[in-house]
Image (cartoon, grey):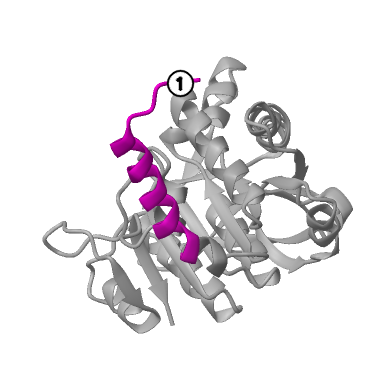
Amino acid sequence: MADISLPDVHTQAETLIKALPHMQRYDQEIVVVKYGGHAMGDPAAAEDFAEDIVLLEQAGVFPIVVHGGGPQIGAMLAKLGIKSEFQAGLRVTDQATIDIVEMVLAGSINKQIVSTISAEGGKAVGLCGKDGDMVIARKITRTMIDPDSNIEQLIDLGFVGEPHRVNRSVLDSVLKAELIPVLAPVARGEDGHTYNINADTFAGAIAGAMRAKRLLLLTDVPGVLDKDKKLIPELTVDEARGLIADGTATGGMIPKIETCIYAIEQGVEAVVILDGKVPHSVLLELLTDHGAGTMIRR
């Protein structure tokens, strides 16, 4: 038996006592976790993440994992010599590109995450939006102002979509079987084509359809920052909208906040944006008093 000093035992007991009310709060509740960023490429961080997900499931929570894979897709496209075209800073996804996207997201990345969770004692199953028509996508377009004519023009991004409908019956069946769903953000459109969906947006749609207790968006930043670059621990939906309106939220943080607002409007109790590089950030957010990011709620 390992030699554990008395103070260590007391510390462990105090930790469990403090975590218990949080565990009871999430008992039999659904928590959707969007997993991505650089943390996904770090083996140690990936192991920590898998441990968190397995512990949640063993504690009576129903975790659903949605993952991205932008860096891995870019690396595979470069390896195969497929050059990407960009319009207004966004990648145009043609047929050759969507084939690689599906292969990487629904294939190698998805199964790697499933394998890591399984190695930590969990029972995970890898799926994508296509499975059981879980998610039906619709094509999205963007507009930009032509600098020469100052006329707004429509940009065709190819096979880039957004969730149009979510059928929760597949996930209900998976959760009932005590399995952990790991979802790749690829879905079929009503036109029969395959569409790549932003992982944050996909996770928001899943969380809304499942009436999740929490949606966690793991990113590469601590959370939402104010004008002085300090973390904002908590925001209401109106305050979050205000940060976009006054220019405090910029770049990639804007669509993340918009996803948070959408999920809350669909019935999710609260959404948290947090740093996925922090060890055990999921447990720190859900099972401690201080949390680990920015919470947005009604």
Q: Nearer the viewer, residue 52 or 183?
A: 52
Please name the predominant secondary structure of the magenta segment in the image.
Answer: helix
Look at the image and give the residue range highlighted in magenta.
1-21
Taking the view exactly as shown, the residue that stands out farthest to the left is: 228
* Residue 174 vertical position relative to residue 117 in the rendered view, above or below: below
Residue 98, position in %: x, y? 69, 38
Residue 170, position in %: x, y? 84, 58
Q: What kind of residue is marked 1?
A: Ala
- Residue picked out by circle 1: 2
The residue under the point 45% across, 21% down is: 2
* Residue 46 vertical position relative to residue 80 in the rendered view, above or below: below
Within 10 angstroms of label 1, few (less than 14), some, or many (20 or more) residues? Answer: few
Residue 129 makes an appearance in the image:
yes
Label 1 SS: loop
Residue 190 makes an appearance in the image:
no
The residue under the point 46% across, 49% down is: 282
